[in-house]
C-alpha cells in the first residue's frame, strides 16, 4: 500500500507502451521518480523524452527482462541512483497462440522468459531491497504489481503457452502477497488481470528474437494471432483506464485488479468445474458460433 506517491520511485517494465507507459504517466503527475524499462529502444527514448520534458527524474534502460544478468544490472543501478523503489510494476509481456503441442522449444523459452521469468527476476531482485528499506524506515511504503491476465484465471483454447505463463504469474503473486504479510506490514502486492484492452501485446511478434523471427508460424498460430488482434483491437476499456485502476488498487491495498469484472462469470464457472470435479465447461458456450468457427478453421488447416 502506498498512500502518498510524491517523491517515491517507480520501476516499470514494458514502460514504452500500454499499461507501463500509462502507469508512468500517472506516476509522473503524482511526482514520482521513474525507472523506465523496455526492450524497444525507440519507444523507450520517446517515453523518457516525454517525462524529462516535464522535469521528472528518469532512468531509462533497454533491458530484456528474461535475462538475469541484465535485470541484476538494472537493480544495482536503481539502488545506486534512487535506493529501494517503492512501486515495482513487473509488466513486460508478450502474446502467443496456437495449439499447445505446436509451440517449439524456442517459443516456450521466449514466452515464459518474458512473461514469467521477467516477473520472477523483478520479485527476487527488488523485494529484498524494499524489505531492507522498510526495516530501516518505519514510514517506508512499498507495493509490487505483477501483470498477469484473465488468461491466468481461465484456460481458453489455442493459446496454451500464454495461459501457462499467466497462470504462473497469478500463483507467484498470490504467494508473494501471503509471504510479504508474514514479514512486513509496509509492503504488499497485487496482480493485474486485464481482459481485452488495446495495447501493443497483439503485435508481440515485433519483439520475437531473431532466431524465432525466421521460424514460420503454424496454421493454428496464425489463427490465434488473428483472433487475438481482433479481440484486443475491439476492446472498449483503455490502457489509461487500467493504469488508473492500478494506482487505485495500490492506494487501497487491493490485491486483484480487473479491467473487465464482468468476465469473472467465466472464472466462477471454471472454479465450479474444479470444485465439482466436472469436465471443463465449453469456453464458447455463450458464443457457440465463435467456437464452431474456430473448430472449423483448425480442422481445415
Image (cartoon, grey):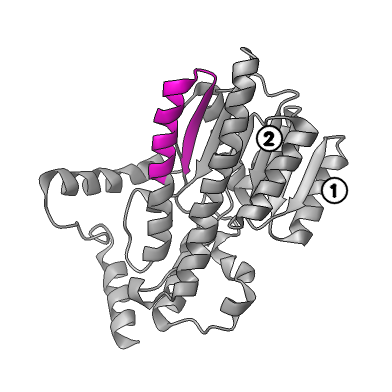
Query: Viewer-proximal residue, 300 or 67?
Result: 67
Question: Which type of secondary structure does the marked residue at label 2 adopt?
Answer: strand
Is residue 179 magenta-colored?
A: yes
State the residue position of label 2: 10
- The residue identified by callout 1 is 49
Going by the image, does 250 lie left or right of 63? Answer: left
Label 2 environment density (alpha carbons within 10 Å; few <14, some 14–19, many ≥20): many
Q: Nearer the viewer, residue 1 or 194?
A: 1
Residue plotted at (19% across, 57% down): 280
Quick check: marks 2 and 1 in contact, CB under 8 Å?
Answer: no
Q: Residues within 10 Å of mark 1 (few under 14, many from 20)?
A: some
Residue 168: % across, % down? 40, 50
Q: Kindly give the residue lying farthest to the bottom in the view shown.
A: 300
Q: Residue drawn 26% across and 73% down?
A: 292
Specify the segment rendered in magenta.
170-192
Q: Is residue 272 above or below residue 113?
A: above
Residue 212 counted in the magenta span: no
Tell me if 279 is positioned left or right of 29 in this view. left
User: As drawn, is 55 to the left or to the right of 204?
Assistant: right
- Magenta region, mostly helix, strand or loop? helix
Q: Quadrant of the C terminus?
A: bottom left
Amino acid at each position: 500500500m502506498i498512500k502518498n506517491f510524491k517523491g517515491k520511485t517507480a520501476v516499470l517494465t514494458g514502460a514504452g507502451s500500454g499499461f507501463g507507459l500509462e502507469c508512468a504517466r500517472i506516476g509522473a503527475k503524482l511526482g514520482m521518480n521513474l525507472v523506465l524499462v523496455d526492450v524497444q529502444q525507440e519507444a523507450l527514448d520517446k517515453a523518457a523524452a516525454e517525462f524529462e520534458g516535464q522535469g521528472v527524474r528518469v532512468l531509462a534502460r533497454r533491458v530484456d527482462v528474461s535475462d538475469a544478468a541484465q535485470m541484476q544490472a538494472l537493480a544495482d543501478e536503481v539502488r545506486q541512483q534512487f535506493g529501494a523503489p517503492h512501486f515495482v510494476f513487473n509488466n513486460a509481456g508478450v502474446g502467443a497462440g496456437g495449439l499447445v503441442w505446436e509451440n517449439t522449444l524456442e517459443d516456450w523459452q521466449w514466452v515464459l522468459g518474458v512473461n514469467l521469468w521477467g516477473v520472477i527476476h523483478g520479485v527476487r531482485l527488488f523485494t529484498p531491497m524494499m524489505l531492507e528499506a522498510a526495516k530501516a524506515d518505519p514510514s517506508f511504503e512499498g507495493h509490487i504489481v505483477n501483470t498477469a491476465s484473465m488468461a491466468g484465471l481461465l484456460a481458453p483454447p489455442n493459446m496454451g503457452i500464454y495461459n501457462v505463463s499467466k497462470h504462473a504469474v497469478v500463483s507467484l503473486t498470490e504467494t508473494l502477497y501471503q509471504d510479504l504479510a508474514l514479514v512486513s506490514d509496509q509492503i504488499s502486492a497485487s496482480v493485474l488481470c486485464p481482459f481485452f484492452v488495446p495495447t501493443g501485446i497483439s503485435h508481440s511478434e515485433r519483439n520475437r528474437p531473431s532466431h524465432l523471427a525466421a521460424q514460420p508460424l503454424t496454421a493454428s498460430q496464425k489463427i490465434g494471432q488473428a483472433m487475438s488482434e481482433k479481440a484486443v483491437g475491439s476492446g472498449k476499456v483503455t490502457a489509461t483506464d487500467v493504469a488508473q485502476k492500478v494506482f487505485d488498487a495500490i492506494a487501497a491495498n487491493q490485491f486483484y485488479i480487473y479491467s473487465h469484472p464482468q468476465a469473472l462469470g467465466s472464472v466462477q464457472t471454471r472454479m465450479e468445474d474444479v470444485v465439482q470435479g466436472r469436465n471443463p465447461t465449453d469456453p464458447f458456450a455463450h458464443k457457440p458460433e465463435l467456437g464452431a468457427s474456430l473448430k472449423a478453421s483448425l480442422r481445415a488447416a
